Amino acid sequence: MIIDLRSDTVTKPTPEMLQVMMNAKVGDDVFGEDPSINELERMTAELFGKEAGIYCPTGTMTNQIAIKNHTQPMDEVIVERSNHVYYYESGGIAYHSLSSVRLINGDRGRIKPSDIEENINPDNIHHPKTKLVVIENTANRGGGSYYQLNEMKALSDTAHKNNLKIHLDGARIFNCLVEINVAPNEIGPLFDSVSVCLSKGLGCPVGSVLLGNKDFISSARKYRKVFGGGMRQAGFLASAGIYALNNNIQRLKEDHKRAKSISEILLKTGWIESFMPVDTNILIFKLKPVYKAEILVEKLKDNSVFCFAIGGNSIRMVTHLDFSDEMLNKFSDVISKINW
């Protein structure tokens, strides 16, 4: 039995999802003729209370299209320094949008309204024009931390009060929503654009949807084309997203429960120096100096348990659709037999 806790991107489609994919109605999406993609875009937009959506291969692409769409060269983007759009997207903001970035030292990947207000540049020739705020919810390197509804509203109000746009990188937004018990259409209107990833906790093999108003999405279609993201009969993939939105949201609570169980198992070992609060499905913990993260990763790998060392003697694990209670029991057994 292989236990893969490297990421929630490693999931495979369930038999039910595969059956839906096999039966999908498809067409040429660049011509706007793929009925499954059209339905997924309509469905996701309606879910979040937005006018329109566009289906893309990846969350990086939806984020980068959004930033490109909201900014001009020599603008500036406010973002927490560990957030995905800055930390994990290969300098895409500089490359695609020719914009600079104002980095915030936040709380486990989260920022406050005051962080926005204190980092808006003066309107003069010496500074880039502050144009956009980006937040990530949940925050990957923050250990799956999330914003409450009132916190998102405060950030939105502050951005708009200062004539800024605000984009939500919602790669794991449903992990947040099931925890705070809030409907997607309560948060969608707070943001000028929203990226929703389908290939993480929702269990799809591919895809993200970018949401916004009709003019924004019309412009996004041209950017998607120039980014190389115009797909043809991709409805086979989009149909998996439709299935996931209908079936795989509430079950995210199971992933969160198993993540907490993993933390309880690890905390009993005596190896742990610190553990980020386990809010959703991501666990990040730091080992005591006498133990080395890279060595523990190899010991676990030798027992068919896969995870990542992420620097600073820390390790990340992520629960997901393909991590079961049976695997949790095996994980506990493996941990109990680790020798240093």
Image (tube, rainbow, N blue to C red):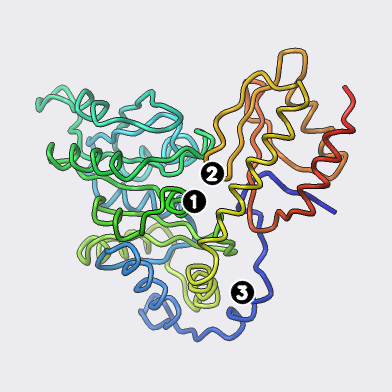
Label pair 1/2, CB-CB below 8 angstroms? yes
Q: Residues within 10 Å of mark 2 (few under 14, many from 20)?
A: many
Residue at 50% x, 79% y is 233
Residue for badge 2? 280
Residue flagged by tag 3: what amino acid is it? Answer: Met
Q: Which mark is residue 327?
A: none
Residue at 25% x, 44% y is 153
Compute the Cα span from label 3 to label 2. 24 Å
Q: Quadrant of residue 93?
A: top left
Residue 190: % across, % down:
24, 51
Q: Residues within 10 Å of mark 1 (few under 14, many from 20)?
A: many
Q: Which mark is residue 17?
A: 3
Disc with the residue nearer the chain's start (1 vs 2): 1
Label pair 3/1, CB-CB below 8 angstroms? no
Disc with the residue nearer the chain's start (3 vs 1): 3
Residue 215: % across, % down:
20, 64
Q: Quadrant of residue 11?
A: bottom right
Vertical placement of 304 versus 122: above or below?
A: below
Q: Which dot, 3 or 1, sits closer to the camera?
A: 1
Compute the Cα span from label 1 to label 2. 6 Å
Q: Quadrant of residue 205?
A: bottom right
Residue for badge 1? 175
Q: Quadrant of the C terminus?
A: top right
Identity of the residue furthest to the left in this view? 124
Q: Which dot, 3 or 2, sits closer to the camera?
A: 2
Residue 87: % across, % down:
47, 34
Tell me how many marks there are: 3
Provide the secondary structure element on which disc 1 rests. Answer: helix
Residue 117: % across, % down:
19, 27
Identity of the residue furthest to the top in this view? 290
Compute the Cα span from label 3 to label 1. 20 Å
